[in-house]
Amino acid sequence: MQPENFYPDIKALGKRYDEPELLAQVKQAIQSGDAVPVTTKETLIIIKPIYDHQSRTGMLVWVGIHRAQKGVGKYFQLVLDMAKSANMSFIRFETKRKGFAKLGARFGYERIGQRNDYTIYQKEVY
């Protein structure tokens, strides 16, 4: 499945969180190779490689959309599996979503900081 199938979802996400240029940014980042889309039937994950202050390589989940009402555990497992297979040291989410604090904690993500109006959560990959 191509990421184009998720363009309406990305556009809605951008509108919901006051990021009107999100779809254009996603398209440009994928085209330039700065981001990689991963899709399943009901999930889109757009990842970017990042580095921390110790020069460790991690994976930023830049955009994450899971259409199914249930099965969010599969989404988080997919993210973890991708990070492990790519030998990433950590996974990071930067989100405006208030509910991520509780949801992320269920899957081992800890709040590590704030950037503007984004809360940053991270999980070490072992």
Image (cartoon, rainbow, N blue to C red):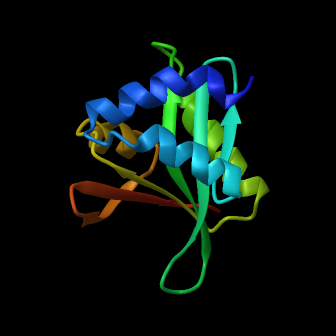
Percent of width and height locating residue 106: 40, 40
The residue shown at (67%, 41%) is 37
Front-lying residue, 18 or 28: 28
Say above or below: 34 vs 101: below
* Left or right: residue 5 compared with residue 119: right
Residue drawn at the location 50% of the way across and 30% of the way down: 65
Give the farthest residue toward the top. 69
Q: Position of residue 81 (x, y in %)?
A: 70, 46
Q: Quadrant of residue 11?
A: top left
- Above or below, 107 relative to 33: above
Picture coordinates of residue 15, whole percent (x, y): 30, 31
Residue drawn at x 59%, y 84% is: 55
Quarter of the view holding residue 56: bottom right
Which one is in front, 97 or 19?
19
Residue at image x 55%, y 38%?
Answer: 76
Q: Position of residue 39 (x, y in %)?
A: 68, 30
Q: Assign the C terminus to one quadrant of the image.
A: bottom right
Q: How many marks?
A: 0
Quarter of the image with the N terminus in it: top right
Would you say 22 lies left or right of 75 here? left
